[in-house]
Image: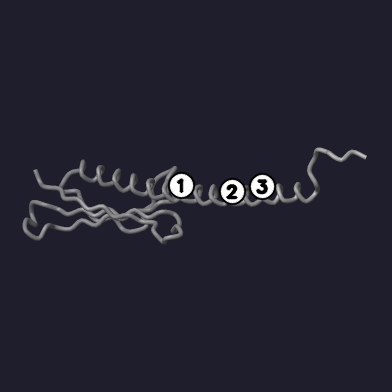
Amino acid sequence: MLANQRGMTLIEVLAALLVLLVCTVSISTGLLTCQKQVASSQEKLTVLQLAQGKMEELMASDFRELEDIQPATVFPAPYTGYSYSVRVASDADYPAMVKIITVTVSGSAPDAAGLNSVSITGAKAWR
């Protein structure tokens, strides 16, 4: 019989597999959390970009044609999951010369924090 055999016992193999399993589960959980946060950030970025684009469109339009747009107006494809509304109000100090524009864009579904919309306010002067 050999007194000095090299190799691992079954208990050592099971202990190594358990350590590997714990590490794998923790890493995969962290990756899933990061993936959800990235998706949420992309949704918020899309909502913000749509709001900025709509505001720029309104700022480029004629002063006399600015008017309210009812809520739940849907963007064209490929952004049909997003809706917007526009509120146009006269400025308190210069009602005939300045209009205050508020654009609100809503996403398709609220995220975990319940945030799915953004509002941007700007002012346009008559020229």
Residue that carries the numbered disc 1 in the rendered image: 38
Rendered location of residue 57, percent (x, y): 26, 43
The N terminus appears in which quarter of the rendering?
top right
Q: Amino acid at mark 1?
A: Val
Closer to the chain start, of discs 3 and 2, is 3
Q: Splitting the image into 4 quarters, where does residue 106 fall?
A: bottom left
* Residue at figure coordinates x 83%, y 39% from the top left: 4
Q: Is residue 34 left or right of residue 19?
A: left
Which dot, 1 or 3, sits closer to the camera? 3
Percent across and percent down for residue 60 are: 21, 41
- Residue 76 in percent (x, y) is at 40, 45
Give me the residue at 78% from left, 51% from top. Answer: 11
Which residue is tagged 3? 20
Looking at the image, residue 64 sits to the left or right of residue 58; the answer is left
Q: Secondary structure at mark 2?
A: helix
Percent across and percent down for residue 125 are 11, 47
Gap in angstroms between the C-alphas marked 1 and 2: 15 Å
Q: In percent of the image, x 44 and y 59: which residue is there?
A: 110
